Image (tube, helix red, strand yellow):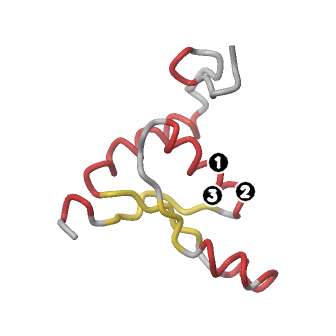
């Protein structure tokens, strides 16, 4: 794996729901995402809550991912703007 494609940690999710939202938002913006710890978290049930869910992206997309997540967290994303509409919106 080249350094450009090496996965880097950009955020940590508090639970699987938050990880799913982060993944969907980044993938919507064409950022490749891997959630480290997701399999362990789901297999282990209640004990899985102690497994850290790390949002990982290729190194060359890390800055874009951090910016997108910061914008989303700050609420500066307008849900109805054309660039942020999901596939099921008009």
Q: Mark 1: few, some, or many residues within 10 Å (few <14, many ≥20)?
A: few
* Spatial CA span between label 3 and label 2: 5 Å
Q: How many marks?
A: 3
Nearer-the-camera pick, 36 or 50: 36
Q: Secondary structure at mark 2?
A: helix
Q: Is residue 32 left or right of residue 42?
A: left
- Residue assigned mark 3: 19
Q: Is residue 57 left or right of residue 48?
A: left
Q: Quadrant location of the C terminus?
A: top right
The reply to whether dot 1 and dot 2 touch (C-beta < 8 Å) is yes
- Proximity of marks 3 and 2: CB atoms separated by less than 8 Å: yes
Where 24 sits versus 77, above or below? below
Write down the residue under mark 2.
17
* Viewer-nearest residue: 55 or 30: 30
Residue 20 vertical placement versus 83 (above, below)? below
Q: Which mark is residue 21?
A: 1
Pointer 3 with pointer 1, Cβ within 8 A = yes
Mark 3 Cα-neighbour bin, 10 Å: few <14, some 14–19, many ≥20? many
Provide residue 28's location: percent of width, then percent of height: 52, 37
Name the secondary structure under disc 3: helix
Is 73 placed above or below 9 here?
above
**Quadrant of res 31:** top left
- Disc 1 to disc 2, C-alpha distance: 6 Å
User: Considering the image in quadrants, where does the N terminus appear?
Assistant: bottom left
- Looking at the picture, how far across and down is residue 2, in whole percent? 18, 66
- Please tell me whether mark 1 sits on a helix, a strand or a loop: helix
Q: Tell me: residue 77, above or below residue 40.
A: above
């Amino acid at each position: 794996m080249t350094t450009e494609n090496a996965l880097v940690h950009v955020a940590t999710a508090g639970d699987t729901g938050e990880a799913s939202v982060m993944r969907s938002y980044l993938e919507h913006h064409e950022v490749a995402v891997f959630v480290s710890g997701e399999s362990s978290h789901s297999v282990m049930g209640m004990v899985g809550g102690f497994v850290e869910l790390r949002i990982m992206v290729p190194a060359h997309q890390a800055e874009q991912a951090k910016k997108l997540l910061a914008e989303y967290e700050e609420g500066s994303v307008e849900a109805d703007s054309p660039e942020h509409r999901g596939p099921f919106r008009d």
